Image (cartoon, rainbow, N blue to C red):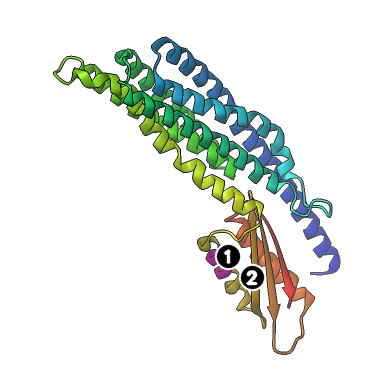
Amino acid sequence: MNERDVEISKREAKKKERRSRKDKLAIEKRILRLSFMGSVFFILAEGVMAWYTHSHSLWTDCLFDSADLVMIGPFMVLVPLLYKPVTEKHPYGYAQVESLFLLVKYSVLLALTCNLMVENIKLLFHGGHDVDAGSIAVFEFLVCVCCAVMYAILGHYSKKYESTTIKAELYMWKLDVISSMGVAIAFAVQTVLLHTSLRFMTPYIDPAVAVVMALLLIKEPVCEIFQSIKNLILFAPEEETLNQIRGIVDQHMKDYPYEVTFLDVIQTGRKLWVEVYIGNQTDVIHISIIHKVRDEIKQELRDKYDQVYIEVIPD
């Protein structure tokens, strides 16, 4: 292949990459827009029902979803920035902005969840309160069905592309399906207890369900906060990810007369930076070979990670 063919190949590769970014951006915007509209609808419905029934479990779900919705709006504006190329002025692009955004989002959700849990624990110690269990059970069952439909729709679109933000949205809808079904079952049980000798327990079911929901909801924010902090201070990714990348690098390097002396991996948001330091016994490095092995490793990593930047550097 002559120099002209190589240059044409590079231009075609760049065009293909730009098209891929545009497609991913369009998919992500579509998913966030659908999630936003669905969240608005369900929050309004839950808010009205929580006000009508005075249910603390419905308020817990409604406020949690509201906090998530408030964060989706600004992020829809931020998404196009995440697809801008790396420049000298922004060597990491805007990837860390996403990590910072997720840190703020999940910190707000964690604070809200803890506050709701404490308030409902207090209510349990003060005798609980009565609610219209039948109406809540029917409402939550309908919410569960609708959330399942929304989760299926978003899951269909995410098959083409899935970022950390999309994963977070899918998680929220999946959690809504599970929590709605759990609440529906709990209040269906309460309607049965009203006609038994265990009637005295019914005032405690609503705050108890709210506490259980808070305990289930608290895990994800804690995990994501720690992950976002690691991304912001540019720590290496999880050991599993590191081992996978090391295996791919070693697999390609064995075909060349070089050895990996050091592997530097940084993951922030959806972007992954890999620097492979190499050396050999003769201290002779061929630039053409470096470019070839870099392209091979990059191509394989692109099939597993979203936005990959890789350099092979003589040590």
Cα–Cα gap, marks 2 and 1: 9 Å
Report crowding for label 2: few under 14, some 14 to 19, many 20 or more residues within 10 A (C-alpha): some
Task: Check disc 2 and give the amino acid type.
Answer: Leu
Q: Point out residue 48 in the picture as x, y percentages from the top left corner.
A: 47, 12
Residue under the point 63% across and 52% down? 231
- Depth check: give the residue in front, 273 or 52: 52
Span colored in magenta: 242-247
Q: Point out residue 108 in the picture as x, y percentages from the top left corner.
A: 57, 34
Seen as rendered, the residue at the extreme right is: 4
Q: Are marks 2 and 1 in contact (CB under 8 Å)?
A: yes
Q: Which is nearer the N-term, disc 2 or disc 1?
A: 1
Left or right, 126 with reference to 12: left
- Number of numbered labels in the structure image: 2
In the rendered view, tell whether residue 47 sits above or below residue 150.
Answer: above
Residue under the point 33% across and 29% down? 182
Left or right, 160 with reference to 87: left
In magenta stretch: residue 244: yes
Residue under the point 63% across and 49% down? 269
Q: Which residue is mark 2?
A: 263
Left or right, 147 with reference to 284: left
Task: Look at the image and tell me in which quarter the N terminus lies.
Answer: bottom right
Q: Nearer the viewer, mark 2 or mark 1?
A: 2
In the rendered view, tell whether residue 286 sits above or below residue 118.
Answer: below
Kindly state the secondary structure of the residue where label 2 is placed.
strand
Task: Check disc 1 and give the amino acid type.
Answer: Ile
Q: Point out residue 19 in the picture as x, y percentages from the top left corner.
A: 72, 45
Seen as rendered, the residue at the extreme front is: 126
Q: Which residue is mark 1?
A: 245
